[in-house]
Amino acid sequence: MRPRIPTVITALAAGALLALALPTSAGAASGHFDYTSGGIGKSLTDPVNGRCYSIAGATAVGNYTNRSATVFTGIGYTGSPALVRSGYRRSGNVESVKFS
């Protein structure tokens, strides 16, 4: 019977590489989403994916997370949607945002 140590080491190395390649959290964006509301700068830090955030009265947004954000002109995913990719800013009236 031949030793199986090389096979075990190869399997462990492949598993470690796969673990490093996967994102650390599927449930949250990493970074911050900045917006201006009422002339005051505000920020969402590490927002949860799929959750609707109310940012009522926002007139400008900046997405500095590692995920795309969809902003809406109405509360709770209503009104016109617009995609704000990571690293981009957008001007205009925004009432809510969702990350994906």
Image (tube, rainbow, N blue to C red):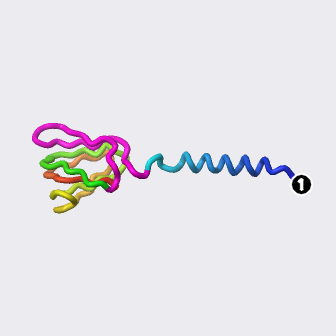
Question: Is disc 1 surrounded by few (<14), some (14 to 19) or many (20+) residues within 10 Å?
Answer: few
At 29% from the left and 53% from the top, the residue drawn is: 69
User: Is residue 74 shown in magenta?
Assistant: no
Residue 45 located left or right of residue 80: right
Q: Is residue 55 above or below residue 40?
A: below
Secondary structure beneath dot 1 equals: loop
Q: Position of residue 31 (x, y in %)?
A: 34, 41
Left or right: residue 8 versus residue 33 is right
Query: In which quadrant will I find the N terminus?
Result: bottom right
Task: From the image, tell me which residue sits under label 1.
Answer: 1
**Farthest bottom residue?**
79
When asked about the image quadrant of residue 76, the answer is: bottom left
Query: At label 1, which amino acid type do we have?
Result: Met
Q: Residue at x 14, y 47 (%)?
A: 59
Q: Position of residue 88 (x, y in %)?
A: 28, 47
Instruction: Find the magenta span and give its range.
Output: 26-50
Q: Quadrant of the C terminus?
A: bottom left
Task: Identify which residue, 81 or 49, lies in the foreground.
Answer: 49
